[in-house]
Amino acid sequence: MMKMKMPHYYYSLCAMLLLVISGTTVVTATDHIVGANRGWNPGMNYTLWANNHTFYVGDLISFRYQKTQYNVFEVNQTGYDNCTTDSAVGNWSSGKDFIPLNKAKRYYFICGNGQCFNGMKVSVLVHPLPPPPSAAVAAEHSTKSASPPPGLLDWGLYSLMVSIVLHFYFGLDRIGLVS
């Protein structure tokens, strides 16, 4: 009996199918540009700007400004309230500063060349990452109807696909199509 080899792309296709069925979620970070199209300049209400944004762990806050005129310092609340850089934990001066917000906490940023007194300061509250959308949707659906527990259908589909792939693979092996 002649043996046929299954093409390698078949196994890759099966692996990709299993990844898709497993429900892998991709999360992307948001880049919050301080002051939007007006950038980091005196005379803006950055408190109002910050209150119109929701910041999450992993997001970026970006400052865009003339690098010869302004800068950015991350300070504590006292430094923010008094416009001083004594407590600075970071400083930037490139004119296009991308600062990662890696912790759930309140961040304070000021301009360190005296412009803080002209409004160049912003405070943002960074929240923990929200739960994945699929968990929220599953929880909402489970309370509205008598459906199976959240995740049961996902695991059921996953198990079914694994069974089919294994059955197909070992079935072909037994009849001599795969070596």
Image (cartoon, rainbow, N blue to C red):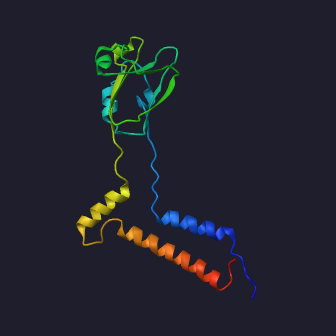
Whole-percent x and y of residue 170?
Answer: 59, 79
Q: Quadrant of the C terminus?
A: bottom right
Residue 142: which quarter of the image?
Answer: bottom left
Q: Is residue 175 found left or right of 167 in the rendered image?
A: right
Where 161 falls versus 76 (above or below)?
below
Write down the quadrant of residue 134 in the picture: bottom left
Instruction: List x then y, in percent, for residue 69.
Output: 48, 14
Q: Position of residue 143 (x, y in %)?
A: 23, 65
- Where 78 sits versus 39, above or below? above
The correct choice, above or below, for 146 with respect to 76 in the image is below
Q: Compared with residue 36, is residue 95 higher up or lower down, i.e. above or below?
A: above
Q: Residue at x 30, y 30 (%)?
A: 48
Extreme residue in the right direction = 2
Residue 169 % position (x, y)? 60, 77
- At x 32%, y 65%, the residue is 150
Residue at x 63%, y 84% (from the top left corner): 174
Quarter of the image with the N terminus is: bottom right
Which residue is drawn at the image coordinates 36% and 55% (left, top)?
133
Q: Is residue 144 left or right of residue 19?
A: left
